[in-house]
Image (cartoon, coloured by chain):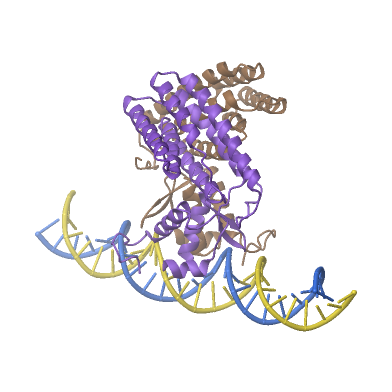
Chain colours: A purple, B brown, C blue, D yellow
Amino acid sequence: MNTSADGTAEHAHTTAWIASVLRTRIAAGELTPGSKLSEEPLCAALGVSRNTLRQAFTTLAGESIVTRIPNRGVFVASPGVEEVREIYRVRRMIEPAAVLWGELTPQVLEGLEIIVQRAQQARDSGSVPDMADANQALHGAVVALTGSASLQELMDRVLAEMRLVFHSMASAPDFHSHYVDRNVTLVKQLRAGARQDAAEGLRAYLDEAEAELLAHLGSEQDRGSGMRQRAG
Amino acid sequence: MNTSADGTAEHAHTTAWIASVLRTRIAAGELTPGSKLSEEPLCAALGVSRNTLRQAFTTLAGESIVTRIPNRGVFVASPGVEEVREIYRVRRMIEPAAVLWGELTPQVLEGLEIIVQRAQQARDSGSVPDMADANQALHGAVVALTGSASLQELMDRVLAEMRLVFHSMASAPDFHSHYVDRNVTLVKQLRAGARQDAAEGLRAYLDEAEAELLAHLGSEQDRGSGMRQRAG
DNA sequence: GAATCCAAGATTGTTCAACAATTTTGGCCA
DNA sequence: TGGCCAAAATTGTTGAACAATCTTGGATTC
């Protein structure tokens, strides 16, 4: 019996639906990194069979949103130091590449401009979550310059993993406010067609952001429940 | 009852095993692009239950090796013109990026050198498959310069899709022989530390290769059984 | 009291049989 | 030939069952 509530769930969609529900809950921080997703309770809570839940698990594991340990269960991914390094390895490649070789149409530049303004407003009103959102939106839009759905998907996964990193931190200081101006500069350079400068500035920003995040992660050690992912 | 034949198949591995078997058969061209993977016959052939086969399908669909159409079944991916364009969008970003910003150790350069020599030998002996292999190995090794497992995984998927493109072509002309020298030049430039030149040459090569492949694909039209993927 | 070992219980991985929903097939009719 | 419809085949999902593995709690030993 599919969700009779609002309608859209005929036949052949419940697995994808369950995967999407879990994805959303994890992204929202309801299911915290490292926590176990036991089959029986979840089946009952979601109203699906164990088999379809397991299939949804397979989907999420493929997206690295969840970690499967044979015979032990599946856990919300809990990215640690090594995963953060990998995140920035990816970003340091594809973001500058997008800036150097992506397509810069007036419409796209307009979109970037709007996002940067949103970030400035968020900083003015002191809203850290809004600043984080705007920052992610901006860097996602940068990768969109490539016009590639695969790269966009990879970037989305990377940004989702970043959110997990933030969710797993006991204290979440303001990582974003002093990067707003850098983003303003980036967009200004793009508007001026200074791709080379934009790419270099972007790489410098990514180096700094990685270092700052790693420093905070190192200082926080392992207190809190979030057991780290085993090293790759 | 898992494979009792050679041993390694205790508990909790058959889904991954099945996925790997299918992956291999598709890569080898035994299962041709566009062909349908019906559940019942495959279950019988592989000796697994319908449920685990379906789970393997979910894994492969996540890797874009297979296309799932709700209520119709799963089919071996059959990349067409649009997919080829996407492949080269990705490659035109991450390969030059790897060349510009990857880590160039002497060991890695040595590895590239060896691959290029393999390509030259393949050309001398006139073996098109060996040339194709060497070409893929070289470009995979270029992406490995990034040090990023995620980017490597993306590149592996892209190269696998390229193989599908070749498998779906009725006639497979020699796409590689006249690119061997270009690859030699690329490695030479890397050895000399001329990253900028290498990146530009690489982008030019990718543009040419894409154009040539698209031209051949366009001339071949739709004869043959391989129905194209529906447009994205 | 702390550490070790072991059997009972719980959990995961897989199979099987069933059923609803949907698609495909094959024949009938105009 | 072309369209229409019921029968058959196929997919998506469920529920119960079982083997393998992990976890737990207690008894035993030092």
Q: Residue at x 62, y 30 (%)?
A: B145
- Residue B96 visible in the current orientation: yes
Task: Indicate whether B134 appears above or below C26.
Answer: above
Q: Position of residue B130 (x, y in %)?
A: 61, 31
Q: Above or below — where is B215 with respect to A140?
A: above
Q: Position of B162 compared to A147: left or right?
A: right
Q: What percent of the width, then of the height, locates residue A100?
A: 47, 23
The residue nearer to you, when weighing A125 against A80, is: A125
User: A207 left or right of A18?
Assistant: right
Q: How many numbered marks does the figure carry?
A: 0
- Across and down, in percent, residue B77 comes to 44, 44
Q: Is residue A4 left or right of residue B101?
A: left
Q: Quadrant of the N terminus of chain B?
A: bottom right
**Of residues B216 and A60, which is closer to you in this image?**
A60
Quadrant containing the C terminus of chain B in the rendered view: top left
Quadrant position of residue B80: top left
Residue A66 percent across, percent down from the top left? 54, 54
Q: In this rendering, does residue B175 appear at all?
A: no
Taking depth in this image into account, of A79 and B109 the one nearest to the observer is A79
Residue furthest front in the image:
A125
